């Protein structure tokens, strides 16, 4: 990291910290209880004002908060919010968006690549699915995704994705947090930290999952060392009744006004408590979470109720847990939620796209559900004028091998594949009707314009107006960022 970036990182941290410092001094002046200043307090009060004056001169407008409670981005954003449709387990690239007719010629032959030559399956297996060109762009899409094929001109396909490890846990963590170990903040937490929220009555970052069973679990949406206010709100969507989605959200005895009085008293005590503990970020996050939870009683009861949608809209999405989650995601971003992730899981299989056996049939069934709801989401956003500034992502932690994992052809499966796979993006500044990058003729490795997960994250941040090298947080003596010390923005896929 350059000295310039390090300086900018420190400045950014100071900007984000400045408002809480002002609030603290104001509330202490109003506090009637006696308070003895420590030496640290004395130095802070004497020197803090001069420091902020100098900082304001350096930063100018970047010091100000953006409208709607958010923070000012580094530059003009193309997108304001993100919906990540996460296909847990890894969908096969050669059966979705990356046709490989050469596999027919090499059918049955074992991989000679050093990384994959230990395969014990029946060799290369071509996709049984037909590919056809769709839209004015003429992008090849598998017959298993007819609905996404119809709107492919609104989408960009990256065919040159790659990640570091072909195992679920580290690959999931890297796609969600940028690191293969559960020690870093998630992408949604970074975005919330960098941009703030657009709605004080709802969480800024929401995770939807039809089942509590999910590989890795909460570490995928953790705030880690970022302040607690940037932690995701996780919602189980197995039962879409609002009182099931948001348990205990309504007080059965007290009115809203009575609760407001009660919370005001509790929050005053909390602020007094926090002031005596140097405004600990974790404590401050808990205090803010209480306020958000209270405000959610009114707004969330409306937003989370997909039953308010007309029947024809619900029919467009479908009647499955994933479809319900997609419709709820649209309602959430429409009401100001910054980042929504939908994990495609179920009670029987927490990695449904992990088709180690009976791949062909399993893939078709999964696509039947995911394709309809995903295309409906993109179409619905476009019809409502939301797609232009909402980035939709479709994909998993890696792809599937172009060769069979086992020798039983009738039930053949595909293994994990991390050296080449595909992702779909739509809206939010993405150049629709484009294909970026390429894998080799067998779909084994990236052949052109590689996009590592770090590059992918840098691009997403860029679309939301954030410089991935400047969005940093100082922890344990160093500046951390989502992309660590890597990442290049893929500008070719942007409008």
Image (tube, rainbow, N blue to C red):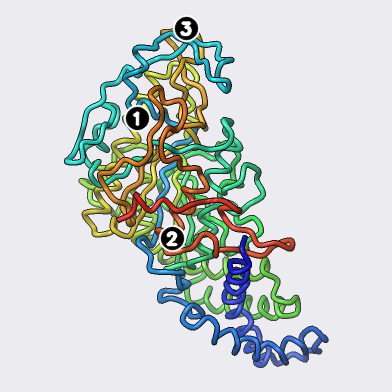
Between 440 and 245, which is closer to the camera in this rendering?
Answer: 440
Considering the image in quadrants, where does the C terminus appear?
bottom left
- For label 1, count other residues whose C-alpha is less than 10 Å away and answer few (under 14), some (14-19) or many (20+): many
Q: Residue 463 sits in which quadrant?
A: bottom left
Question: For mark 2, what is the residue?
Answer: 338
* Numbered disc 3: secondary structure: loop
**CB atoms of marks 2 and 3 within 8 Å:** no
| Left or right side of 68 for 119 | right
Instruction: Provide the residue designation for mark 1.
Output: 98
If you read the primary sequence from the N terminus, does the residue marked by circle 1 or circle 3 appear first?
1
Task: Determine which of the numbered discs, if any, sits on residue 408 in the image.
Answer: 3
Quarter holding the N terminus is: bottom right
Residue 4 picture location, percent across and down: 59, 69
Which one is closest to the eye, mark 1 or mark 3? 1
Query: Could you tell me which residue is drawn at 58 percent across and 79 percent down?
Result: 264
Seen in the picture, residue 171 relative to 103 is either above or below; the reply is: below
Q: Is residue 311 left or right of residue 108?
A: left
Q: Judge whether residue 14 can be spotted in this image.
A: yes
Label 1 close to label 2 by CB (< 8 Å): no
| Label located before the other in sequence (2 or 3) | 2
Please state which of the two labelled residues, at mark 2 or mark 3, is closer to the viewer. Answer: 3
Q: Is 146 situated above or below 220? A: above
Query: Which element type, helix, strand or loop, lies under badge 2?
Result: loop
**Residue appearing at x 49%, y 83% in the figure:** 60
């Amino acid at each position: 990291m350059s000295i310039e970036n390090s300086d900018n990182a420190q400045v950014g941290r100071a900007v984000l910290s400045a408002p809480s410092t002002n609030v603290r001094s104001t509330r202490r002046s109003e506090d009637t209880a006696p308070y003895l200043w420590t030496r640290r307090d004395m130095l802070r009060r004497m020197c803090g004002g001069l420091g902020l004056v100098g900082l304001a001169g350096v930063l100018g407008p970047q010091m100000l908060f953006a409208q709607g409670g958010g923070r000012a981005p580094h530059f003009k954003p193309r997108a304001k919010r993100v919906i990540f449709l996460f296909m847990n387990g890894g969908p096969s690239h050669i059966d979705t968006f990356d046709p490989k007719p050469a596999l027919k010629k090499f059918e049955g032959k074992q991989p000679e690549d050093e990384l994959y030559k230990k395969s014990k399956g029946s060799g290369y297996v071509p996709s049984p699915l037909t590919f056809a060109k769709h839209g004015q762009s003429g992008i090849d899409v598998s017959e298993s995704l007819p609905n996404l094929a119809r709107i492919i001109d609104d989408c960009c396909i990256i065919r040159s994705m790659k990640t570091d490890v072909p195992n679920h846990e580290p690959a999931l963590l890297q796609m969600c947090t940028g690191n293969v170990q559960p020690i870093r903040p998630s992408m949604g937490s970074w975005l919330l930290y960098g941009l703030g929220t657009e709605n004080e009555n709802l969480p800024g970052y929401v995770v939807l999952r039809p089942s509590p069973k999910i590989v890795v679990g909460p570490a995928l949406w953790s705030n880690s060392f970022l302040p607690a206010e940037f932690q995701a709100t996780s919602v189980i969507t197995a039962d879409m009744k609002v009182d099931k989605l948001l348990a205990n959200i309504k007080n059965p005895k007290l009115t809203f006004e009575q609760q407001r009085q009660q919370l005001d008293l509790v929050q005053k005590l909390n602020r007094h408590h926090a002031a005596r503990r140097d405004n600990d970020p974790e404590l401050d996050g808990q205090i803010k979470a209480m306020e958000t939870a209270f405000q959610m009683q009114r707004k969330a009861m409306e937003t989370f109720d997909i039953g308010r949608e007309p029947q024809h809209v619900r029919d467009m999405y479908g009647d499955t847990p994933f479809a319900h989650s997609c419709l709820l995601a649209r309602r959430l971003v429409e009401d100001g939620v910054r980042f929504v992730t939908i994990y495609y899981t179920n009670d029987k299989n927490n990695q449904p796209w992990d088709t180690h056996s009976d791949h062909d049939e399993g893939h078709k069934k999964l696509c039947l559900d995911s394709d309809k709801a995903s295309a409906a989401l993109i179409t619905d956003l476009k019809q409502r004028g939301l797609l232009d500034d909402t980035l939709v992502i479709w994909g998993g932690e890696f792809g599937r091998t172009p060769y069979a994992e086992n020798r039983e052809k009738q039930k053949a499966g595909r293994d994990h594949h991390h050296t080449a796979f595909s992702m779909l993006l739509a809206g939010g500044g993405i150049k629709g009707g484009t294909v970026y990058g390429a894998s080799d003729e067998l779909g084994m490795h990236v052949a052109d314009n590689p996009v590592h997960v770090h590059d992918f994250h840098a691009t997403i941040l860029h679309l939301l107006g954030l410089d991935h090298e400047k969005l940093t947080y100082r922890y344990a003596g160093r500046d951390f960022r989502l992309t660590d010390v890597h990442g290049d923005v893929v500008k070719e896929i942007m409008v």
